[in-house]
Image (cartoon, rainbow, N blue to C red):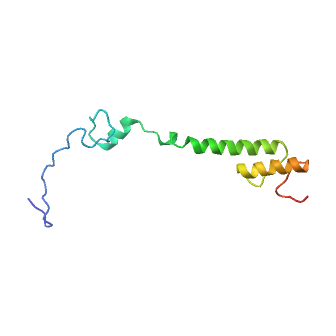
């Protein structure tokens, strides 16, 4: 039977064979859907970006150490923290980026 739009209605579409919708790297190839395959792979995207997180932790740690010494960097960026620490060494007193001249 066809609909007014020329599409067959009521025709059963045979299910895809197991594994035909799996990821390329799937070792078992026994999943009915791509979703099942991805869940079985237990992928964790949060583990990918650890380098950026470590860099951020280092920047914040350096800023925290500078603040403990009484130094006030302009930002939490590592470059600004190092500049403020160098200025403090040259001045012989804690540097304050909010008041660089006094």
Left or right, residue 18 beside residue 84 = left
Which of the 4 image quarters holds residue 40?
Answer: top left
Provide residue 64's location: percent of width, then percent of height.
Answer: 76, 43
Residue that lies at the very extreme toward the left in this rendered image: 1
Q: Position of residue 74 (x, y in %)?
A: 77, 55
Q: Position of residue 57 (x, y in %)?
A: 66, 42
Examine the image and state in which quarter residue 101 appears. bottom right
Name the residue: 20% across, 43% down: 16
**Front position in the image: 14 or 71:** 71
How many numbered marks does the figure carry? Answer: 0
Residue at position x 13%, y 67% in the image: 4
Determine the residue positioned at 69% across, 45% down.
59
Instruction: Give the camera-side residue of 64 and 25.
Output: 25
In the rendered image, residue 3, in percent from the top left (x then y), is placed at: 13, 63
> Which residue is outermost to the top?
28
Q: Quadrant of the C terminus?
A: bottom right
Tell me the residue at 84%/42% (across/down): 69
* 26 vs 17, nearest the viewer: 26
Whether residue 72 can be seen here: no
| Residue 54 visible in the displayed image | yes
Outermost residue toward the bottom in this view: 4
Which quarter of the figure is the N terminus placed in?
bottom left
């Amino acid at each position: 039977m066809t609909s007014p739009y020329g599409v067959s209605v009521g025709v059963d579409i045979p299910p895809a064979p197991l594994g035909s919708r799996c990821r390329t790297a799937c070792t078992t190839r026994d999943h009915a859907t791509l979703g099942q395959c991805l869940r079985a792979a237990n992928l964790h995207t949060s583990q990918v970006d650890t380098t950026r997180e470590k860099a951020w932790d280092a920047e914040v740690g350096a800023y925290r150490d500078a603040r403990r010494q009484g130094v006030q960097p302009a930002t939490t960026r590592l470059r600004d923290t190092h500049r403020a620490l160098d200025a403090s060494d040259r001045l012989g007193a804690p540097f304050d980026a909010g008041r660089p001249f006094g």
